[in-house]
């Protein structure tokens, strides 16, 4: 599963390879499928693709006439994942309820133009994930302004585990106490 694919214009190297599921938390109007080799999911609704159940909740309050935003909850192999993507403020109560107690939460950690780091820390406390994966943070080559994930780590009071790849087993999640912060190398 690939979330929010980006182009080389961002200054970063886009992901390569075939992806069976592509989640888009930000979709421009008019809507079009930019990816031909996978199933593109954008917008609210329920989807099931190759055994992965995905529920999208539109964020009308955070959208505009040029784009719309969606948050997702995905379930695969008894592991639940929440994708907050491009949020710039806390999701409304109905979206928060659908994301409550996800095992893994992907959340913007770089501040503006996305949700600020203090508000992101509050969202983590409200949702109670076992693993928090930082996204949309400062990286070498990135052409837009963004804060470092280390400031986000300070905000939530954790030292992150920096990984090349995240592998998760349901058994390990059951045994884990509290939330663990992860930053994936870019």
Image (cartoon, grey):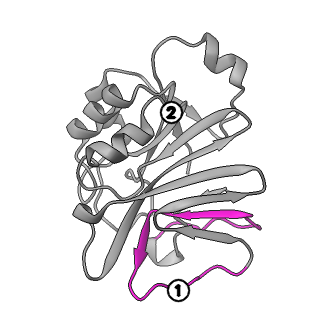
Direction from residue 68 to residue 98 in the image, left or right = right
Q: Residue furthest bottom?
A: 30
What secondary structure characterizes most of the magenta part?
A: loop
Q: Residue 43 colored magenta?
A: no
Quarter of the N terminus within the rendering: bottom right
Q: What segment is highlighted magenta in the picture?
A: 11-36
Element class at badge 2: loop
Say if residue 148 shows up in the picture: no
* Residue labelled with disc 1: 32
Q: Position of residue 154 (x, y in %)?
A: 29, 27
Closer-to-camera residue (143/70)? 70
Direction from residue 177 to residue 89 in the image, left or right = left
Q: Position of residue 77 (x, y in %)?
A: 74, 36
Question: In the rendered view, would you say 46 is above or below 42?
Answer: above
Element class at badge 1: loop
Q: Residue 26 colored magenta?
A: yes
Say if residue 130 shows up in the picture: yes
Closer-to-camera residue (15/53)? 53
Direction from residue 38 to residue 183 in the image, left or right = left
Write the residue at 78% across / 56% down: 50
Q: Quadrant of residue 165?
A: top right
Query: In the drawing, what numbered circle is on residue 154?
Result: none
């Amino acid at each position: 599963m690939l979330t929010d694919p980006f182009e080389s214009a961002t200054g970063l190297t886009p992901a390569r390879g075939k992806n069976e599921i592509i989640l888009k938390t930000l979709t421009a109007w008019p809507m079009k499928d930019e990816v031909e080799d996978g199933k593109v999911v954008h917008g609210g609704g329920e989807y099931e693709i190759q055994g992965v159940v995905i529920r999208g909740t539109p964020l009308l309050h955070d959208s505009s006439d040029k784009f719309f935003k969606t948050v997702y909850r995905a379930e695969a192999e008894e592991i639940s994942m929440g994708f907050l993507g491009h949020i710039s403020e806390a999701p409304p109560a109905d979206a928060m309820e659908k994301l409550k107690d996800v095992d893994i939460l992907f959340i913007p950690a770089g501040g503006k133009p996305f949700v600020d780091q203090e508000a992101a820390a509050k969202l983590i406390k409200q949702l109670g994930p076992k693993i928090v994966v930082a996204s949309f943070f400062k990286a070498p080559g990135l052409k837009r302004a963004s804060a470092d994930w280390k400031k986000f780590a300070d905000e939530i009071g954790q030292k992150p585990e920096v990984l090349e790849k995240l592998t998760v087993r349901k058994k390990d999640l059951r045994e884990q106490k509290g939330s663990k912060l992860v930053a994936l190398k870019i």
